[in-house]
Image (cartoon, rainbow, N blue to C red):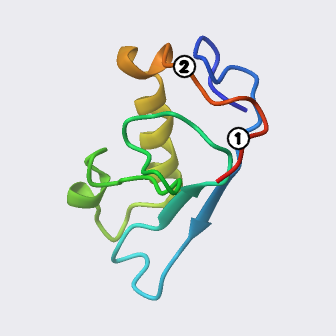
Amino acid sequence: MGPAGTTLDMRVLELAIECGPSYPEQPPDLRFRTRVNLPFVKSDGRVDLKTLGVKQAWRRNNSIEDALNAVYHAIMRPECRRGKQPPEGSRY
């Protein structure tokens, strides 16, 4: 579910998580399946972890939860909270 108080509030969001062969040395790849309009999400739905600062700060003891928390906190930023979103149910 999208975070309360945002334009994604109460929307079902689908996010694919892929841990490559170098996980946990490198962060997982995150990709929205549900279309969203967020500055850190590329045109194909991939989350740009570098923009969020996750890629640079990643350490072996980080977890998938850390990457997901970074996405959540980014959605809660003022510049993301009110952005116009694609119609509900739109997919990449």
**Residue 35: percent from left, percent from top:** 63, 43
Question: Is label 2 in a helix, a strand or a loop?
Answer: loop
The amino acid type, in three-letter code, at marker 2 is Lys
Question: Is label 1 in a helix, a strand or a loop?
Answer: loop
Left or right of residue 71, residue 5 in this image: right
Looking at the rendered image, the quarter that the C terminus falls into is: bottom right
| Mark 1 closeness class: few <14, some 14–19, many ≥20 residues within 10 Å | some
Q: Identify the disc placed on residue 31.
A: none
Q: Nearer the viewer, residue 63 or 41?
A: 41
Q: Provide the residue designation for mark 1.
A: 13
Left or right of residue 55, residue 43 in this image: right
Looking at the rendered image, the quarter that the N terminus falls into is: top right
**Residue 59: percent from left, percent from top:** 28, 65
Q: Nearer the viewer, residue 46 or 61?
A: 46
Residue at left 62%, top 24%? 3
Residue at left 59%, top 26%? 85
Tell which residue pokes out farthest to the left in this image.
56
**Residue 62: percent from left, percent from top:** 39, 61
Q: Provide the residue designation for mark 2.
A: 84
Task: Give how far apart the Cα atoms at labels 1 and 2 are.
Answer: 15 Å
Residue at left 31%, top 52%? 54
The amino acid type, in three-letter code, at marker 1 is Leu
**Residue 9: percent from left, percent from top:** 68, 20
Left or right of residue 27, residue 57 in this image: left
Which tag, 1 or 2, sits closer to the chain's start? 1
Q: Nearer the viewer, mark 1 or mark 2?
A: 2
- Residue 87 picture quarter: top right
Tell which residue pokes out farthest to the bottom in this image.
21
Rendered view: 91 above or below 75: below
| Mark 2 closeness class: few <14, some 14–19, many ≥20 residues within 10 Å | few
Q: Nearer the viewer, residue 51 or 89?
A: 89
Residue at left 46%, top 68%? 28
